[in-house]
Image: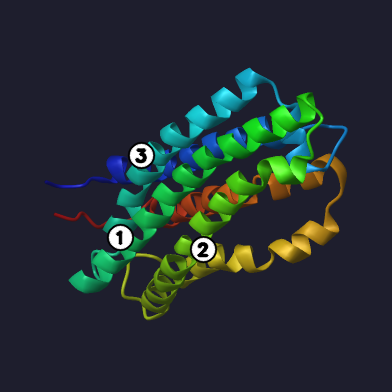
């Protein structure tokens, strides 16, 4: 089956929408104009906000996986085993985005209960937070493998991507999160840092779509 330029663009737009949707889910958990304490903000979120945020985890994971098709097409010129490593590593990370966000419902729920019943929030959310941290630890090695193969193949011009896409690959802006966190304050800090990981993917899929928008190639 031929993948034409229209569907290549649709895939990229799907990835962008997935990032924006899960970013919205982050804000449903975190945003409070009067506070920069993310866990406390979750404790003050309404039931409907927590439920809606949980739903975005599933929907955005679907959109992200459609967006991954664009990366698969871009890596068609690479060797099969390398393309498969990139595909499965990226897929594992995108699925983890949905799973980890869904797991945040437990943190938000326990934070809300601790706020309502005056229970120590750190103690109440400890188990859910520890589980979430363990999920993240499992993702880091996969992220390292993806970064190695993605960056090296793009730099060697073994893909349809131009080299400048490396600047927008999630690893690069991820390394600057600490600096960004120190520069921002107030509501801007909550918005950017609270949704930082999903904004990384919005930026990546936007750059990927721009890079491939006028690609002449059609792949089988």
Residue that label 1 marks: 87
Q: Quick check: 11 above or below 143?
A: above
Residue pushed farthest top? 48
Q: Of tags 2 and 3, which is closer to the observer?
A: 2
Residue under the image location 52 percent in, 51 percent down: 201
The front one of 1 and 134 is: 134
Query: Which quarter of the picture shows residue 39?
Result: top right
Query: Which quarter of the picture shows residue 118?
Result: top right
Q: Which badge, 1 or 2, is on the more N-terminal residue?
A: 1
Residue that label 3 marks: 10
Between the C-alphas of marks 3 and 1, the distance is 18 Å
Q: Position of residue 71 (x, y in %)?
A: 34, 57
Q: Position of residue 86 (x, y in %)?
A: 33, 65
Category of crowding for the residue at label 3, using alpha-carbon neighbours closer than 10 angstroms: few (below 14), some (14–19), many (at least 20): some
Residue under the image location 56 percent in, 24 percent down: 51
Category of crowding for the residue at label 1, using alpha-carbon neighbours closer than 10 angstroms: few (below 14), some (14–19), many (at least 20): some
- Look at the image and name its color scheme: rainbow
Numbered tag placed on residue 137 in the rendering:
2
Q: Position of residue 209 (x, y in %)?
A: 43, 50
Q: Could you tell me which secondary element the residue under label 3 belongs to?
A: helix
CB contact under 8 Å: marks 3 and 1: no
Q: Could you tell me which secondary element the residue under label 1 belongs to?
A: helix
Residue under the image location 59 percent in, 53 percent down: 130
The front one of 81 and 151 is: 81
């Amino acid at each position: 089956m031929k993948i034409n330029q229209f569907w290549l663009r649709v895939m990229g737009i799907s990835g962008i929408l997935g990032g924006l949707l899960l970013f919205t889910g982050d804000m449903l958990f975190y945003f409070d104009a009067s506070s920069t304490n993310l866990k406390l903000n979750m404790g003050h979120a309404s039931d409907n906000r927590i439920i809606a945020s949980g739903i975005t985890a599933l929907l955005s994971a679907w959109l992200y996986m459609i967006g991954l098709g664009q990366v698969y097409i871009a890596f068609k010129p690479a060797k099969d085993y390398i393309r498969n490593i990139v595909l499965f590593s990226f897929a594992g990370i995108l699925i983890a985005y949905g799973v980890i966000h869904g797991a945040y419902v437990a943190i938000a729920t326990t934070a809300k209960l601790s706020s309502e019943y005056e229970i120590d929030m750190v103690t109440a959310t400890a188990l859910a937070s520890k589980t979430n941290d363990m999920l993240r630890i499992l993702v880091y090695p996969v992220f390292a493998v993806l970064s190695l193969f993605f960056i090296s193949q793009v730099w060697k011009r073994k893909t349809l991507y131009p080299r400048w896409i490396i600047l927008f690959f999630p690893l690069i802006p991820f390394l600057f999160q600490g600096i960004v966190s120190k520069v921002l304050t107030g509501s801007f800090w909550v918005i950017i840092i609270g949704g930082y990981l999903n904004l990384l993917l919005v930026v990546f899929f936007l750059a990927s779509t721009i890079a491939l928008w006028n690609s002449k190639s059609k792949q089988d």
